[in-house]
């Protein structure tokens, strides 16, 4: 799993460099969550009866595209067409670009309400598929998140699992300082969710949390590091915006190589 995550991070750096796009730090922070989901959790073999994954923090689309490529669900040409004029994949997800991209997203706060609707529909149809959604911690400041948080337990959506990529950095600083959401675990517990908190870079811990039985909707708070595994990017706000030049890409790949050897 470590090698899979490293490969995904290399993919992210590659397309960030090709496209000159920002948000590389955000993509690197959620890589281990996506790797665990796509290689350990999601049932995707039967497309019509597949589990659903919603990337609500859609500015991290590079991480999803790179994971789909690593899973052989996206071609190299499509991956390298990311964020190009006349290209294949937009900066934020578009559901018409790939069968495994479930929603068109951009404005934060939409993913959880959409996932709730999907999970409720599956329940009404008595289907067994599950719905997973990944949000950012800054995104949890959106009012639509809390409307969905109140409704999901009322609808008994035990087929809904939500991850928060808690890297504590959003566009203008520390999420916990700009508009504090803590104690977010206690807030979701008060709404009658099953809440777990894990190291968001520990694949086994993430998988165990997903598999813990419950009859409630589940929130998994993943403590992560923005820019994870690229030493000079880790926990630095500037990597919400800075682009990956050729020089930066080479330096970052060297960091990933060092991490492989540890």
Image (cartoon, helix red, strand yellow):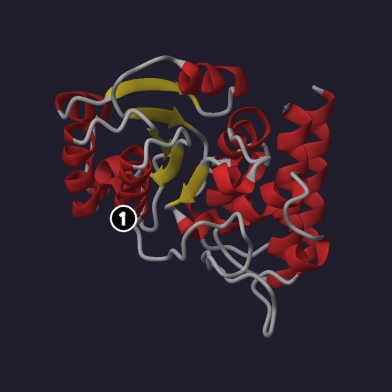
Residue 23 visible from this viewpoint: yes
Foreground residue, 125 or 76?
125
Using the rendered view, name the quadrant where residue 232 is placed: top right
Which residue has dot 1 on it? 109
**Residue at position x 82%, y 43% from top?**
254
Q: Quadrant of the N terminus?
A: top right
Q: Residue 11 at what x, y percent from top left? A: 75, 52
Q: Quadrant of the C terminus?
A: top right
Residue 158 as seen in the image, left or right of residue 4:
left
Residue 205 to residue 65: above or below: above
Using the rendered view, name the quadrant where residue 39 is placed: top right
**Residue at position x 52%, y 50% from top?**
26
Residue 215 to residue 93: above or below: above
**Residue at position x 45%, y 29% from top?**
223
Q: Residue 185 at what x, y percent from top left? A: 26, 26
* Count of all numbered marks drawn on residues in the image: 1
**Residue at position x 16%, y 39% from top?**
150
Using the rendered view, name the quadrant where residue 201 is placed: top right
- What kind of element bears circle 1? loop
Foreground residue, 195 or 137?
195
């Amino acid at each position: 799993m470590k090698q899979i995550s490293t490969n995904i991070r290399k993919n992210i750096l590659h397309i960030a460099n090709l496209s000159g796009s920002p948000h590389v730090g955000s993509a690197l922070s959620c890589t281990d969550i996506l790797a665990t989901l796509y290689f350990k959790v999601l049932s995707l073999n039967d497309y019509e009866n597949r589990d659903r994954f919603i990337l609500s923090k859609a500015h991290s689309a590079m991480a999803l595209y790179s994971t789909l490529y690593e899973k052989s669900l996206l071609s190299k040409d499509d991956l390298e067409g990311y964020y190009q004029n006349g290209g294949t994949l937009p900066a934020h997800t578009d559901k018409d670009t790939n069968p495994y991209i479930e929603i068109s997203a951009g404005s934060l706060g939409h993913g959880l309400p959409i996932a709730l609707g999907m999970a409720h529909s599956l329940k009404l149809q008595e289907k067994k598929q599950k719905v997973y959604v990944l949000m950012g911690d800054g995104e949890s400041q959106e009012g639509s998140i809390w409307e969905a948080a109140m409704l999901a337990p009322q609808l008994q959506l035990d087929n809904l699992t939500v991850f928060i990529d808690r890297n504590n950095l959003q566009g203008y600083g520390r999420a916990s300082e700009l508009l504090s959401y803590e104690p977010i675990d206690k807030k979701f517990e008060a709404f009658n969710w099953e809440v777990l908190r894990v190291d968001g870079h520990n694949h086994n811990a993430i998988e165990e949390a997903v598999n813990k039985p419950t009859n409630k909707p589940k929130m998994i708070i993943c403590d992560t590091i923005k820019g994870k595994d690229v030493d000079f990017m880790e926990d630095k706000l500037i990597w919400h915006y800075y682009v990956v030049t050729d020089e930066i890409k080479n330096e970052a790949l060297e960091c990933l190589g060092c991490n492989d050897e540890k």
